[in-house]
Image (cartoon, rainbow, N blue to C red):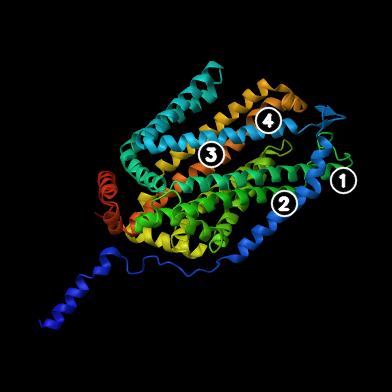
Amino acid sequence: MGINEEETLTTTLIDPESLDNPNPTYQKGELQESKCRDAWAAILFYAQLIAVCCVCGVLGVPAVRRNVGDVVVVEGRTDYTGLIYVTLIAAASSFTLSTISLTLMTTCPKFLIQLSLLFSLLLSLLITATSFYYQQYIAGAFGIIFFLMSCCYACCVWRRIAFAAANLNTGLTAVKRNGGVFVTSVWITVVSFGYLVVWMVAMVGVYDATGAAAGGGGNVEGNNVQPSWGYLFLLLLSLFWTQQVFQNTIHVIVAGVVSTWWFAPDEASSCCSVAIKDSFIRATTCSFGSICFGSLLVAIIQTLRSMVESARHDSSNDGCAAFVLCLVDCLLQCLQGILEYFNKFAYIYVGMYGYSYLEAGKNVMTLFHAKGWDIIIADDLVSNTLSLFALIGGGLVGCVGLATNAAFPSWLAGFEGAASGIAFGFPFLIGLVISSIMLSVVDSSVNTVLVSFAEAPEEFQQNHPKLSGEMRDAWRLVYPAECGF
């Protein structure tokens, strides 16, 4: 064999590029040029936002003024002042509890993951015992089944706690070194809360206008007229879309900050680092259309699910209609899960490199497939823990609402028998939304760690050797064959 032929064979068998890129169809991500992508989605989003603000000003504000007075109930009209007070208290409580949760997660991530598993077991056992105590034997039987399933799940995932804790610790370290990302998250959450208030006032205006058109005299409580399905669809779509955009904006910002910390830690190692500013500007300008695009897809399915749920509770439906609606709801739930799974990783590439929405999703899924990490990214232990914390936060805020109603019963007296339900349900919803947005910082950081570790483990070893060693040890322990090292 000649020298040239030997060099050619050696180059073919040992290609340095193939060590980092085992799949020839996959190419590492590259920073894209600064230009607006998926701009049509951003324009459409701003249009609906302006429309909601117009409805709020033209219909909502006059309706609230007509129905807010010094007396709780005047001529059948409900005073919304107390509801506004409860909303403000619920929002303040949500911010406080979310801050406490984030602080706890930065100190003992492994313990909190274990605690979340044990809490789910305890909760299912408590529901079972309560059902049998009130002689609800069918519910108790289902509770036993759920408890046994929870035990099986805990046993199966217990050995993966070290893996999840290592990922969580790395993600938390990245965001702790860039504490300003939490401030940015709080700011975006405050803006989302402001929009929620505007949307509520707009909803009151639509109800009031619908009642007036139906002969109810513009009295929100004085008639049982509901908005048409068209109005309801548009209002819910606006609510879900905007909430998704706020949440995904945080996701993209965190992805940009964590990836900068991964590749260039000198630019992402302070509370007000350059990475935070650059990631925020990119997420709210060039990549904002991509954020709106993916958020719209999920929001449409969420809106359809809400309307199907409303139709399912209609007592006029026969058995066949109820069965069809149940199937439709299951189908929509599956579609929503697929889209949310796709968005979770697509937005990381949007934040890291500035790709368009579809291109980012395609590239990141190709990355995981090339690495053979499909089973690893399906590990949702950290996400389940964060979801449980968000649910607990919502429940605690709901309890704050009940305590507020007990301390100031006159605030919600106009709602009569529904006062207790509103005192818990409405703050619970606010707490759940705000907690979910705040905790999404942690979830986004962990997911970015997964993508970055798949794409550039060498850079991580070079820039953060201690964390890299911890992650490699944990990954070898849980996924010795899949991790590839």
How many labels sit on residues?
4
Q: CA distance from mark 3 to mark 4?
A: 19 Å
Residue 213 - label = 1
Give the structural element (helix, strand or loop) at label 3: helix
Q: Looking at the image, is 316 positioned above or below residue 451? A: above
Three-letter residue code for mark 3 = Ser
Q: Earlier in the sequence, mark 1 or mark 3?
A: 1
Q: Earlier in the sequence, mark 2 or mark 3?
A: 2
Q: CA distance from mark 4 to mark 2?
A: 24 Å
User: Measuring 42% from the left and 59% from the top, which residue is drawn there?
Assistant: 365
Q: Earlier in the sequence, mark 3 or mark 4?
A: 4
Give the structural element (helix, strand or loop) at label 4: helix
306 left or right of 225 in image: left
Three-letter residue code for mark 2 = Val
Residue 216: % across, % down? 87, 39
> Please, which residue is most extreme toward the left here?
1
Locate the C terminus by quadrant: bottom left
Circle 3 sits on which residue?
435
Circle 4 sits on which residue?
422
328 left or right of 357 in image: right
Q: CA distance from mark 1 to mark 3?
A: 38 Å
376 left or right of 129 in image: left
Q: Nearer the viewer, mark 1 or mark 2?
A: 2
Circle 2 sits on which residue?
52
